[in-house]
């Protein structure tokens, strides 16, 4: 007698109150005029509580806050005059070698008398003490427009930092420059002048990781030119340039944002992501992001935006391994895409979008992005997003902590006493689409789309599959999708599941 097995798949979604596709753990909204989330940077555990922290700026009020994504609490706050540009650029580096990051604050509009030079201060978090205080060299340098910690370049035990000054003059033109300073005593380690024909060099700066495998972190500096943009990577050991690349189209914004993203392709070399938020497609500016190899500096992949004036690549950040596949991933902001959009791209798979999150109208969601650590202790890295225009009239701004856990499978088969039944339980998120493809039955290829549906807010879907013969084993592929604002389904994740059923 032939037994007919029925395969029941029960799908459940995590119970979360979220407006974003992959789940929002928590958010913080600023006060009137704060413009919270204008700048963000990851700090690691900066307060010694065992949880990762980040720093974000409120460019409207001048406050700079240290924030715990795990608890939602502001851990420390530093106040500066917003007229000095406070809150527009922030970073972190352990300059005092106490094992915890200190906060770097850029003040690109800071003046001496009536002349604007720009300024950078470094605060210790525990007591607010100013550890370093630096000024630009020339009027209108915009010194501090961009800041970043770059690791310990000179092996003195203190992490160093880089400052961009895109207004620095050369022959009367704002050509720009960047300087690297010692975390120990703020002495200048390197000065990177703008290459010929490059404007606003130092608009972006980033820790590039060890791209040349000499054991010393390297430094990336980018420009923002109406003509051709350029990025350069400099050796942290020598200060000499080891890599440069020009933009592909005039005015594409190439180099507007950059981030070291780690070794995305497993070749042992750290890679670099570069945003070009005005990249043209069919004559329209849509934006793009590219990842470049640390091995040979060739392009690993480029993702081009789809929304006109969406500004894909306006912000980029390495966010760690959000899907636990062993390779680092990256977050990319498109604040001009309606209310703003952030996409989490899988570093290893040439730009597959793992997650897509959307803001609301005029939020500028994605204006800034950074890693948030494992904010909910589920084993997966999470992501922080700044939306400084939140609040249509009052511009409070907001930061959002987005959960980016992979979909966890509990595939233990159970056989009920009254019928042969296998129950599978998945954890997902509201409004995700999913599809199941039956790949093989009893070892025989069996390519068939079984069912598609969408996770409901209630979190339960039950499907019954009767294959019509004695079922000993089954393999199927589950895929999860998000739908972006253009209505396109974007694959988020896939898993292959094989089951040997009991006799």
Image (tube, rainbow, N blue to C red):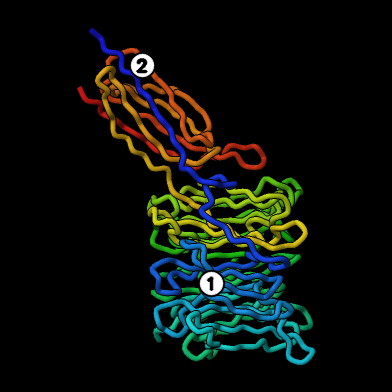
393 is higher (above) or lower (below) than 163? above
Q: Can you give x and y, in whole percent of width and height, for residue 110 in the image?
A: 71, 84
N-terminal label among 2 and 1: 1
Q: CA distance from mark 2 to mark 1?
A: 56 Å
465 is higher (above) or lower (below) than 177? above
Q: Considering the image in quadrants, where does the N terminus appear?
A: top left
3 is higher (above) or lower (below) than 188? above
Left-right relation of 498 to 46:
left
Q: Can you give x and y, in whole percent of width and height, for residue 453 in the image?
A: 52, 29
Tell me the residue at 75%/65% (across/down): 227
Tell me the residue that label 2 is attached to. Answer: 467
Q: Residues within 10 Å of mark 1 (few under 14, many from 20)?
A: many
Q: Secondary structure at mark 2?
A: loop
Q: Secondary structure at mark 1?
A: strand
Residue 227 shows up from this direction: yes
Q: Residues within 10 Å of mark 2 (few under 14, many from 20)?
A: few
Residue 66: which disc? Answer: 1
Q: Considering the image in quadrants, where does the C terminus appear?
A: top left
Left-right relation of 88 to 458:
right
Q: Can you give x and y, in whole percent of width and height, for residue 78 in the image?
A: 59, 79
Q: Nearer the viewer, residue 273 or 82?
A: 82
């Amino acid at each position: 007698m032939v037994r007919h097995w029925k395969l029941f798949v029960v799908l459940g979604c995590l119970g979360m109150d979220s407006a974003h596709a992959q789940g929002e753990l928590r958010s913080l909204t600023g006060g009137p005029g704060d413009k919270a989330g204008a700048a963000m940077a990851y700090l690691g555990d900066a307060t010694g509580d065992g949880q990762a922290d980040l720093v974000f700026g409120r460019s409207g009020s001048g406050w700079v806050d240290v924030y715990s994504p795990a608890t939602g609490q502001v851990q420390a706050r530093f106040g500066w005059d917003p007229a000095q540009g406070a809150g527009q650029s922030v970073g972190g580096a352990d300059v005092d070698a106490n094992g915890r990051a200190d906060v770097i604050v850029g003040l690109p509009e800071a003046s001496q008398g009536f002349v604007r030079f720009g300024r950078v201060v470094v605060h210790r978090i525990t007591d607010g003490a100013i550890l370093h205080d630096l000024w630009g060299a020339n009027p209108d340098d915009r010194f501090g427009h961009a800041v970043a910690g770059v690791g310990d370049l000179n092996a003195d035990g203190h992490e160093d930092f880089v400052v961009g000054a895109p207004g620095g003059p050369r022959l009367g033109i704002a050509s720009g420059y960047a300087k690297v300073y010692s975390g120990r005593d703020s002495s200048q380690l390197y000065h990177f002048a703008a290459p010929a024909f490059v404007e606003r060099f130092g608009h972006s700066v980033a820790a590039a990781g060890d791209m040349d495998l000499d054991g010393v972190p390297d430094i990336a500096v980018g420009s923002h030119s109406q003509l051709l943009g350029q990025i350069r990577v400099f050796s942290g050991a020598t200060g000499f340039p080891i890599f440069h690349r020009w933009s592909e189209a005039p005015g594409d914004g190439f180099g507007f944002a950059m981030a070291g993203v780690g070794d995305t392709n497993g070749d042992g070399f750290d890679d670099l992501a570069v945003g070009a938020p005005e990249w043209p497609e069919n004559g329209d500016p849509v934006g793009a992001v590219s990842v470049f190899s640390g091995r040979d500096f060739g392009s690993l992949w480029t993702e081009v935006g789809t929304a006109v004036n969406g500004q894909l690549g306006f912000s980029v950040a390495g966010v760690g391994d959000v899907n636990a596949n062993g390779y680092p991933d990256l977050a990319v902001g498109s604040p001009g895409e309606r209310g703003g959009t952030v996409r989490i791209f899988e570093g290893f798979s040439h730009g597959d979008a793992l997650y897509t999150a959307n803001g609301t109208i005029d939020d500028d969601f994605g204006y800034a992005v950074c890693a948030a650590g494992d904010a909910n202790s589920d084993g997966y890295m999470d992501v922080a997003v700044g939306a400084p225009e939140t609040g249509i009239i009052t511009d409070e701004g907001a930061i959002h902590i987005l959960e980016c856990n992979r979909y966890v499978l509990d595939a233990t088969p159970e056989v009920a006493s009254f019928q042969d039944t296998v129950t599978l339980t998945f954890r997902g998120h509201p409004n995700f689409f999913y599809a199941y493809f039956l790949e093989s039955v009893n070892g025989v290829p069996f390519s068939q789309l079984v069912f598609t549906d969408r996770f409901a807010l209630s979190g339960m879907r039950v499907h019954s599959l009767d294959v019509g013969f004695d079922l000993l084993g089954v393999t199927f592929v589950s895929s999860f999708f998000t739908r972006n604002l253009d209505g396109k389904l974007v694959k988020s994740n896939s898993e292959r599941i094989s089951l040997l059923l009991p006799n």
